[in-house]
Structure formats: C-alpha cells, structure tokens
Amino acid sequence: MTKEAVLARYPPAPEALLALLHDLQGTNPGQYLLPEDLELAARHVGLPLSRVRDAVTFYSMFSLRPRGRHIVRLCVSPHCHVAGAWSALDELRRALGVDVGETTPDGLFTLEFTSCLGACGVAPAMMVDDEVVGNLTPEKVRAAIARYREGR
Amino acid sequence: MTLARVHVLVGVDDEARLAGVDAVLSALRAAVEELGLSGEVQVVETGTLGISGRGVVIAVQPDGVYYAEVTPADCREIAEEHLLKGRPVARLRLPTAAPVARPGELLARQTRVVLANCGVIDPERIEEYIAQGGYEALGRAVTELRPEDVIELVKRSGLRGRGGAGFPTGIKWSAVRSAPPGERYVVCNADEGEPGTFKDRLILEGDPHKLLEGMALAGYAVGAHLGILYIRGEYALSISRVRKAIADAEGLGILGERVFDTDFSFRVEVRPGAGAYVCGEETALLESLEGKRGWPRIRPPYPVTAGLWGKPTVVNNVETLANVPDIVRRGPAWYRTLGTPTCPGTKVYTVLGSVRYPGLVEVEMGTPLRVLVYELGGGLLPGRTLQGVLIGGAAGAFLPPGELDTRLDFDSLGERGAALGSGAVLVLDERACVVDTLGSVLRFFHHESCGQCVPCRSGTDVLVRLIGRLQGGGASRSVLEQMLTIVDAMRAASLCPLGQSVALPVRTALAGFPEEFASHLDGGGCPQCQATVRALGER
C-alpha cells in the first residue's frame, strides 16, 4: 500500500495518530518510521511534529531505526524468567549471531526483549512477528528460527 | 436442526493454535465423517477449557472426559474407540492420579460466572451465546428498566472493579450518570499487561459477547452511545473475535442503532494498543486513545468527571464488565450469595508455575490461596516443595508458605499489605530464587516506567542497580535498607499506581524471605542470580 493510500484510510484527527503510524511503519521494508513519515502523519492529523515524535518514541511497537524482516521478541518478565528465558536467550544469540537490539547482517531478523506477552501458560515464550512460540527449549528456538529463515 | 448425542469441545485459544489445533480439528471432523457419526457427534470449537501447558485439550460431553496433548494422529482412535464404541482412550486422558481431584472434577469445583460459557459455547456464534441466556439482560434493561434501575442493581450487587483497585462499580457508574448533560463514554480496559496475567484474553477469546453485553449495559446505565475497547496489540485472536462479535450483534439489532428497537443506540469500537504497560492505568489509557503518549494524568479530576476528550467516562476492566449481564439477569440477591459480604462474586485467576494443573480458574471471593495451589492447581509438581507464591503479577506480593491460608479478596489481602491485583498466581518451588525473581520484577518496572515523574523514573533505575549488586554478590546489608527507603518514597510520591506499587513486591519479598536475601549478601549468591548477571552483562 502506498503512503497516500494509508493516509486516506484515516480521518484527519489526532486520535487516528497511533493507528496511522502503525500502518505507515508497515509500508517500509525495515519496519520502521522514516523522518518523512512523521512529517506526513503530523500534517495529516494536524499536530506539531514534536507531538508525533513524542508518541513514536514512547511506544515499544514503533522504531526509528531499520529492523529486520522478522522481529523476534523474547519475554523476560517474571514467569518466563523463572521458567528459563535465559537459556532461550543463549540459543537465540547463537542461532542469530546477534545480541539484543541488533539486526542480523542479512536483514532477516531483529532480536528484542519484551515485557509479558500474556502467553505465560507456555512460558518461556517469544513472539516472532505475530506468532507466539512457547515452551521454549534450545531445539524449539532453533526450529522456529530455521522455519522463518526458510520463509515459513 | 438435529440434536447431537455427543459434543466434542475443542478449546481454541492462542496456546492451542500453537499446539496445532487446526490440524486436530480437521482430523477429528474427518474421522467423525468417515465413521458415519456426523449425525450424532458434533465437533464444537470453543474457548479455553481452562487447562494450560498441555497442548490441544478436548472434552467429550456429556461423558466429562478430557483429553490432553491431542495430535491429528490420535483423532481416528478417539473417534473409533470413544465416540463410536464408548470406550475412552486411556492413554490420552488427563492424568487421574492427582492427590485431590481429577481435572474433570476440578472444573466442577469452581464457581463459574464470568467463565460460565468459556469452553462450552462456540464464541464465534452469537446464537450459542443467546441460547445460554445471553443478551436477555440487555433486552430487559432497555425495554423494562430505567438507567437508574440498572445502576441500582449493580450497586446492590456490591460488584467491585476487577482491575486491581476494587472500586465499587455502581458508584463509578452513578457518578458518570449524574454528570452534567452532554457526551459521555464507556471504555473497556483490555490492555492486559500485568506479568502472569491473561484472564482477559481468555474471556475475550472464549465469550466475547458477554463483554459486549456488559459494555452495552454500562452504556445504557450512564447514557453513553459509544463504547471503546482498548485491547493490547499482541492479542490478535481476541481482536478478531471481538470484531466478529460486534458485527454479528449489530446484524441482529442488539448493538448499533436502535438497540432492541428502542431509542437507545450503542456502538462499540476496537482500538489495539501499541505496547506500553502503563497504558493499563486508566488515565494513561485515555491519553493513548487520544493519540498521545501514554502518560498518566494528574488526578483529580477523575475520568468519571473528565475522561476521554474531557468528557465523563466509565473505565472498567474486562472481568468487571463480564460480571454485569448475570447481575442484571439473575439479580443482586443471587450475586451476593457468592463471595464475602464486602467482596461479593467470583474472581478469575491464572494459576501457573510449579503446579500439576496450570490454568485458568474462577472461584468465589474469599477462597484461601491454599485451595488454588493445592486443590485446583493439583499441588506442586512431583518431587517439588513450595518455596512461595507471587500473587498479583509484578505489582504483586511474595507470600511464603506460612501465608497460604490468606483469603483472596480485596479486604483480606489489603490487611496484609498485599493486593488482589490481576489474579496472577505464580507458584515457586525450591529451585526458584526469590532474589532473582524480584530482580526480574524490578527490571520489568524499570523498563515500563513511563518516565514522567521523578520518583518512579529514578527510583526504578536505582532499584535495578541495587538488585544487580545483590545478585552479583557485591552488596552489604545497607543495600536492603536503601531499597526499602526508595520504595517507600516511590509509594508516597509517585504519580500513578505503577510507581506506588513497586513497594509491594520489594517489601513482601524482604519480609517473607529474609534468609534468601541474607545468603546473597557479602559475596554470597546462587546459580540463578549468576545466570542473570551473566545474561545481562553480555548485552
């Protein structure tokens, strides 16, 4: 979808800002917001650029830096922590070759920490894009990464 | 329409999807078809069956047999042996060797109001909700009752907000009702982010119409025409089920313009959140709905006088609103037969950690914690001993085994300085380290502090550094005293409950587990803490 088409879907009102930014972010290959996206959004909803930047930097779902095609978010909240999130982290570092906050050189994966995903029934858990992967063992981590690497 | 002899209920939630429920469903339907049972066996997709961590779970009714970890390869056997010949497949049944009760009985021992339909009806079929008495309360309210009567019913029921604070719902509604004439709103807080909590997700996935009926009743009671459901963005299945439910209800004239052919109109909009724990705080949530960063507002004014866009607004939790249809339909006298005199009704919990039967349970207010852990949770995993319980999520309390007889309601827990919070119950066995678990709690708050007020922004930062020293073995006793000083200052001076509530886990952990902390001082430590220090140090 073009950026113009995204803008056309939302009323020119401040309450549309977050959903609009979300969709604008989706139009960029690196799943991030470019400076011109913030300007487009500000003009569309009628807010100063500073207010738009203010919102973007607050929510964890927005990024101002390019990210990988797939975003791997490992939960480190208490339930997953107690259930062994660190051994999953070790395996993610090995499988991806990057640390938390970094993107693989091939641009395929970004590794992030996240707060509780509400998937505590299958702790330790992570999300890859929109999919929850739970009861993580080193084998399950490797299998999930391999599956996304091969394009699902 | 034919009457089925047997219903096979298949729990479809995020966890079951992960375990491959879609393939199980098609295999099961194919097997039923092949055996010529289609006329008498109905396969029903429903919400969670309340059993967690055991893959795809299905229930065969009226036999009351539960199967866990079902794979597509098992379906033919289940169909042939059980559905055709009436012989349950022993190898797949949930274990019956539990010390107290079998899982089938565990469900029977709960008191289900909010979850009454979860795992029983198909949440994507509005007809099934209606068949269970759904939308009867709304229909009666808009045609026979005045808005004031609905508020009176809720007040007399004694319903208190299930989001954590326990504020009386009827009083909140009547404050909005009596505001000066003009626009007003109903906002449902489904930005569930408290660690260990996913009860609202399972209500949304398992019985979305019950929540919509509760919202519409709130709207009628306070005179609102728009309800906004703020759901956290990660809950994809909840969002799609609620959207379908809204469309179906509008199609039947139950929501939207002229509800039940009356002059009352009520629309519901869904807004996904963008990932911020603090947006579970009601005024931060309102800011987020207005398109701003989710910074809590200074109160007063409270949302009941100046909420969304400055208009009077009811903000209620999912579980609170899901109680309302039954209160209106069955009356406050019935509701008061459940729970305690000051906390009537039930409470939904997620019991997780080192228990045999982790999952979702609903029991009466005032039920002792021991019942949740040892009866409904089936006790500790084989060979494990209880170290303690973290109840209420990160903003919760660490309770040692001696506190297991604590009754779970707003007042009993309040006396002990604890809070009922979100209903998250994390059972820790002897392998878990309380210091390490508290470290995870504090890092959570540090990450989620919104940064607006100094006590919370700075306080969480210092706490994370102090617990890091403790975990690394480089702390003396004065570190523990510093932690207490900081959390007390945060409790007194933080702007919103996020900063205020950090005192609870810190104080209860230090009070309930003094030896654990002592053993970490002056060069002491434990493998868990070392693993944490190593993992974080590598960043």
Image (cartoon, rainbow, N blue to C red):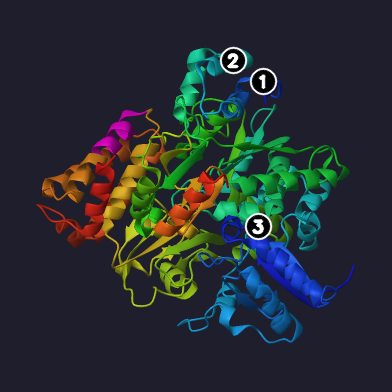
Quarter of the figure with residue B222: top right
Residue B296 is situated, as x and y percent measured from the top left of the image, at: 46, 31
Q: Name the residue under label 1.
A: A7
Secondary structure category for the residue under label 1: helix
Say which amino acid is labelled 2.
Leu
Name the subunit of mark 2.
Answer: A
Q: Nearer the viewer, mark 3 or mark 2?
A: 2
Residue numbers of the magenta segment: B453-463
Q: Residues within 10 Å of mark 3 (few under 14, many from 20)?
A: many
User: In front: mark 3 or mark 1?
Assistant: 1
Residue at x-position 49% and y-position 50%: A146
Residue at the extreme right of the image, as rendered: B1
Q: Give the camera-side residue of A93 and B524.
A: A93
Label 1 and label 2: CA atoms lie apart by 8 Å
Q: Work out which quarter of the rendered image holds the N terminus of chain A and state it.
A: top right
Picture coordinates of residue A40, whole percent (x, y): 59, 15
User: Which residue position is annotated with label 2?
Assistant: A40
Is residue B159 visible in the rendered image? The answer is no
Residue under the image location 39 percent in, 73 percent down: B380
Mark earlier in primary sequence (1, 2): 1
What is the crowding at mark 2: few (fewer than 14 residues within 10 Å), some, or many (at least 20)?
Answer: some
Main secondary structure along the magenta-highlighted residues = helix
Horizontal side of residue B373 vs B154, given as left or right: left
Contact? badges 1 and 2 (CB < 8 Å)? yes
For the residues labelled 3 and 2, the Cα–Cα distance comes to 40 Å
| Residue receiving disc 3 | B206
Name which residue type carries label 3. Answer: Gly
SS label for mark 2: helix
